[in-house]
Amino acid sequence: MHVGGTNGKGSTATMLAEVLRAAGWRVGLYTSPHLVSFRERMVVDGVAIPEEAVAVWAERLRPLAEERRASFFEATTAIAFADFAARGVDVAVVEVGLGGRLDATNVLRPLAAGVTRIALEHTEYLGNDLASIAAEKAGIAKPGVPFVTTESADAVAAVLEREALARGAAFERLDVAGAVSGLEARGEGSVFDLATPLRRYGGLRIRMGGAHQVANAALAVRLAELLPARYGVGEAAVRAGLGAARVAGRFERRGRWLFDVAHNPDGARALVAALRSAGVPRPVVGVVAVLADKAWREFLTTLAPALDGLVLTRAPSAPAERAWALEEAAAWCREAGVSARAEEDFDAALAGAAAAGRTVLVTGSFHTVGDAMSRLPGTAPLG
């Protein structure tokens, strides 16, 4: 199973994997990037790849990787597929890394493929407008393979449809607004009804907050329905799988800490909506570090009004060539009327926010969230 899109593809892939596990299959899940440990990328039935296996596969595949001048992600994808084969998975759920058409994962011929919503990202590689990006995302479509999207914008969905049909795929657009009803926020998740072309589900429950996760769940359910009949994914598996799925760093609350890997304006809008519906204790203070190649100005403009305080900092693990210029970001905030303070030291930023807020939101990138989790006891995805 192949899952692409701009935001939400990791959550969709995880929910789909849990549905398949609930149906009794041995499931491999490949996602990226990781938060704290490289091992998070390759999971079989909830168990991350062992360190020893990473070393063995890296050594065994190294000659081929060097001979073919493979990129880091290409080599990582090869390790993941080797690991899944070695651990005997029945089905793998694979998240696209970047784009789709030229992504390393696109060597697959999947049972079904899905694309979440489309937003501007990686414009240096995918194109400067939504239509160009959508065309790249649709590159995972394959002849005769079901291809489903939950994209809500008609013009963008039309591009996905055109490209998918040109590749011979069986295109389907799931209208989430029409398919979902009775949505209620419950604790840290949601309960909702879902009508698909196959059946109507009443009272589905997910453990991840935000209306955007409901859309991701809808796509996961529809992809599961499109599996060949031999996989036997019924309503019971859908309910159990969605109820079990959790994804680290996606509006994840750990005590007073709230982690979200939003890193572009579309993600910021979803985060703000989730904050408003969740009713987290106030004041809410954000610790934010965004990569320089992201639309960080629009990100901050979107996020800041939902917070009671904002601390800009640097994520220690962010590559130097991609780290934002903290002074530039702070100066822009002053000129734009965005209330924020800059703190160069990451640990001091976390401590200062914790002293000022009842809820501390850590967001801006996978690096930012992962660096915080590695410092805070009991928050890392693998413990």
Image: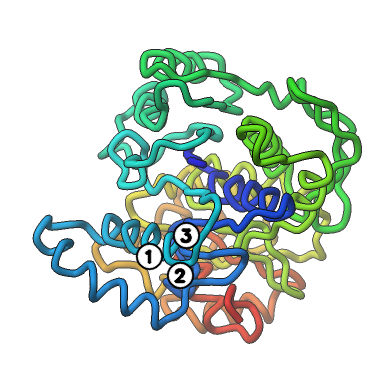
Circle on res. 326: 1
Image coordinates for residue 283, horizontal then vertical, percent:
76, 66
The C terminus appears in which quarter of the rendering?
bottom right
Q: Residues within 10 Å of mark 2 (few under 14, many from 20)?
A: many
Image side of residue 204 versus residue 67, left or right: right
**Quadrant of res 345:** bottom left
Residue at position x 56%, y 27% in the image? 149
Rounded to the nearest angstrom, the CA distance separating label 3 from label 1 is 15 Å
Q: Which residue is mark 3?
A: 365
| Residue 190 visible in image | no
Asked if 30 appears above or below 285 in the picture, the reply is above
Element assignment for label 3: loop
Image coordinates for residue 74, horizontal then vertical, percent:
27, 55
Residue contact between numbered discs 3 and 2, judged by CB atoms under 8 Å: no
Disc 1 residue type (three-letter): Leu
Element assignment for label 2: loop
Give the mark, 3 or 2, whose residue is nearer the N terminus.
2
Front position among marks 3 and 2: 3
Residue at position x 51%, y 35% in the image? 111
The foreground one among 292 and 197 is 197
Rounded to the nearest angstrom, the CA distance separating label 3 from label 2 is 12 Å
Residue contact between numbered discs 2 and 1, judged by CB atoms under 8 Å: yes
Image side of residue 241 versus residue 88, left or right: right
Circle on res. 151: none
Q: Which residue is mark 2?
A: 313
Disc 2 residue type (three-letter): Thr
Q: Residues within 10 Å of mark 1 (few under 14, many from 20)?
A: some
Image side of residue 219 versus residue 241, left or right: left
